Image: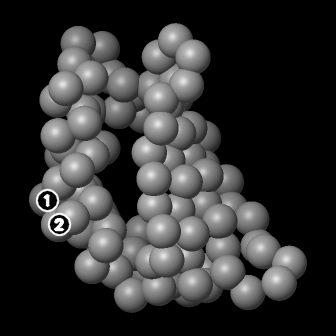
């Protein structure tokens, strides 16, 4: 069964939306879309300063493997540096099909 990973967050103080969107594009093209098992990913802005990233993985194992690699990947590290780490709320859901 597939896994839906939902992460909500806010940008770190002083980070512009333009800088964040550039980093988001880089992490998608240089890291995320190169990971085995990634089916779909999108980032969206909510009301105020809240953001959401939704990723669909083929399996939890694929999501875990990508998370481990992201710890040392330069694009992922840059992306994390623009996010207020205290605001991060990540949840995973397993699809029913």
Q: Which x, y percent locates residue 22?
A: 17, 40
- Residue ranking furthest to the right: 96
Residue 58 located left or right of residue 74: right
Query: Foreground: 71 or 57?
Result: 57
Task: Report the label total.
Answer: 2
- Which tag, 1 or 2, sits closer to the chain's start? 2
Can you see residue 64? Answer: no
Q: Residue at x 24, y 57 (%)?
A: 27
Residue 90 as seen in the image, left or right of residue 26: right
**Residue 18, quarter of the rendered image:** top left
Disc 1/disc 2 C-alpha distance (Å) = 9 Å
Q: Are marks 1 and 2 in contact (CB under 8 Å)?
A: yes
At horizontal 47% and vertical 85% (from top left) the residue drawn is: 37
Tell me: residue 39, above or below residue 71. Answer: below
Residue, disc 1: 74
Compared with 33, 13 (above or below) is above
Q: Tell me where residue 54 appears, x and y as whole percent.
A: 55, 54
In front: mark 1 or mark 2? 2
- Name the residue rendered at 86%, 78% in the picture: 96
Give the percent coordinates (x, y) of residue 24: 27, 46
Q: Residues within 10 Å of mark 1 (few under 14, many from 20)?
A: some
Identity of the residue drawn at 74% across and 65% down: 93
Q: Is residue 35 visible?
A: yes
Which numbered disc covers residue 7?
none
Mark 2 — residue?
30
Q: Secondary structure at mark 2?
A: helix
Circle 1 SS class: helix
């Amino acid at each position: 069964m597939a896994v839906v990973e939902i992460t909500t967050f806010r940008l770190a103080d002083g980070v512009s939306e333009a800088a964040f969107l550039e980093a988001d594009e880089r992490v998608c093209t240089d890291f995320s879309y190169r990971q085995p098992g990634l089916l779909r990913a999108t980032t969206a802005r909510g009301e105020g300063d809240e953001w959401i990233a939704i990723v669909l993985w083929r399996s939890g194992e694929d999501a875990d493997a990508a998370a481990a690699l992201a710890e040392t990947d330069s694009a992922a590290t840059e992306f994390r540096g623009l996010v207020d780490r205290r605001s991060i709320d990540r949840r995973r859901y397993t699809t029913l099909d």
